[in-house]
C-alpha cells in the first residue's frame, strides 16, 4: 500500500491535469508505456542499430541558409480533424519535404489519436539525412530511450501535460543520450516555469490543446519572452507563406507545419509550392 502511495505521489509530481482530450491522451499513453516496457525491454532498445548513431543537430539545420526553417510534419489524423491523410506514403512524403528544403521532419508516433506509428518514423529515418522529431506525448524516460532507438534526433516535451520538474528531468536525460529537446508552450506561465538549460528550442503552439482553437497571435505574444539562447519555433496554424516572412521578422527561426501540407493529395508538392511562394515573397 505504501509503495502504491509513493508511486502515485511521484507520478503526480510529473504530470499536470490539463483537462479535455489531453487527460484522455495521457491515461491512454500511460497504458501504452506499460505495455511497451513488457513487449520491448530497455536492453533490447539499446541494441538497436540507431542507438549509437550521432543525432543531427537541430540548430545546425534550422539556421542553415540553404534551408527554410520549416519542420515539415507527417500526420495521418488528429483528434480535432479526424482523418487527414490515411493513404500517404511516409517515405515518399518526408523525402519530398527534405528535398523542398525542410530543416527537420516531424513524425507522429501516437497510434490511437493521430494514426501514427513507430514504423512511420523508422521509415522516414531510412530515407532522410536531416533531423527528425518524434512527435509524441512523452511521459516517461522509456519513451526517450525508444526515440533514440528508432532513429529520432529530437524529442518533444509538452508543458501543458508535464510539470517543470518533469521537463527538467526528461530534458537532462534526453541530452545524456545526445538527443535534441524541443519544449512546447502555450502561454507565458508555461514558458517561465519550464525553461531549463537542457532545452534546445522553444515551440509556441498556436493551437490550444484543450479546445483546439488556433491563433498565430500566441507566437507574436511570446516571441520576445523567449531568451535568445533558444531556437524559437512557431507551431501549427500556419497556412500562408506570408506568415512565415512575418514570423521571421518577429524573431522566429523555425515553423512547424503539418496539416496544411498533409490535407493535400500530394503533401510533398504542397510544401514545394509553399516554399516557392515564400521565395517569391522575399524577392
Image (cartoon, rainbow, N blue to C red):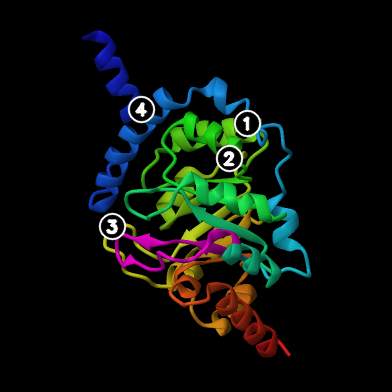
Q: For residue 100, say whether it is visible.
A: yes
Q: CA distance from mark 4 to mark 3?
A: 25 Å
The percent position of residue 103, horizontal first and vertical second, equals 67, 62
- Badge number at residue 34: 4
Q: Nearer the viewer, mark 3 or mark 1?
A: 1
Residue at screen point 29% across, 40% down: 28
Q: CA distance from mark 3 to mark 1?
A: 36 Å
Q: Which residue is mark 3?
A: 210
Q: CA distance from mark 1 to mark 4?
A: 20 Å
SS label for mark 4: helix
Q: Nearer the viewer, residue 32 or 222?
A: 32
Q: Nearer the viewer, residue 147 or 139?
A: 147
- Report crowding for label 4: few under 14, some 14 to 19, many 20 or more residues within 10 A (C-alpha): few
Q: Which residue is mark 1?
A: 48
- Report crowding for label 1: few under 14, some 14 to 19, many 20 or more residues within 10 A (C-alpha): some
Q: CA distance from mark 2 to mark 3?
A: 29 Å
Amino acid at each position: 500500500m505504501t509503495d502504491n502511495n509513493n508511486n502515485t505521489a511521484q507520478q503526480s509530481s510529473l504530470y499536470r491535469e490539463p483537462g479535455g482530450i489531453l487527460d484522455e491522451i495521457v491515461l491512454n499513453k500511460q497504458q501504452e508505456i506499460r505495455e511497451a516496457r513488457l513487449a520491448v525491454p530497455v536492453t533490447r532498445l539499446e541494441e538497436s542499430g540507431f542507438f549509437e548513431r550521432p543525432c543531427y543537430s537541430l540548430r545546425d539545420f534550422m539556421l542553415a541558409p540553404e534551408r527554410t526553417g520549416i519542420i515539415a510534419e507527417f500526420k495521418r489524423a488528429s483528434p480535432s480533424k479526424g482523418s487527414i491523410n490515411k493513404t500517404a506514403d511516409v517515405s515518399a512524403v518526408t523525402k519530398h519535404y527534405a528535398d523542398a528544403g525542410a530543416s527537420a521532419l516531424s513524425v507522429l508516433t501516437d497510434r490511437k489519436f493521430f494514426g501514427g506509428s513507430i514504423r512511420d518514423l523508422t521509415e522516414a529515418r531510412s530515407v532522410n539525412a536531416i533531423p527528425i522529431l518524434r512527435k509524441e506525448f512523452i511521459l516517461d524516460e522509456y519513451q526517450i530511450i525508444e526515440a533514440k532507438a528508432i532513429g529520432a534526433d529530437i524529442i518533444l516535451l509538452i508543458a501543458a501535460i508535464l510539470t517543470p520538474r518533469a521537463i527538467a528531468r526528461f530534458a537532462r536525460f534526453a541530452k545524456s543520450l545526445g538527443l535534441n529537446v524541443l519544449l512546447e508552450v502555450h502561454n507565458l506561465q508555461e514558458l517561465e516555469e519550464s525553461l531549463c538549460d537542457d532545452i534546445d528550442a522553444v515551440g509556441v503552439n498556436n493551437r490550444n490543446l484543450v479546445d483546439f482553437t488556433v491563433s498565430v497571435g500566441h507566437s507574436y505574444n511570446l516571441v520576445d519572452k523567449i531568451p535568445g539562447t533558444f531556437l524559437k519555433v512557431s507551431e501549427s496554424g500556419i497556412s500562408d507563406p506570408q506568415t512565415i516572412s512575418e514570423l521571421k521578422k518577429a524573431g522566429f527561426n523555425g515553423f512547424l507545419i503539418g496539416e496544411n501540407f498533409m490535407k493535400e493529395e500530394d503533401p510533398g508538392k504542397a510544401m514545394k509550392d509553399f516554399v516557392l511562394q515564400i521565395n517569391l515573397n522575399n524577392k
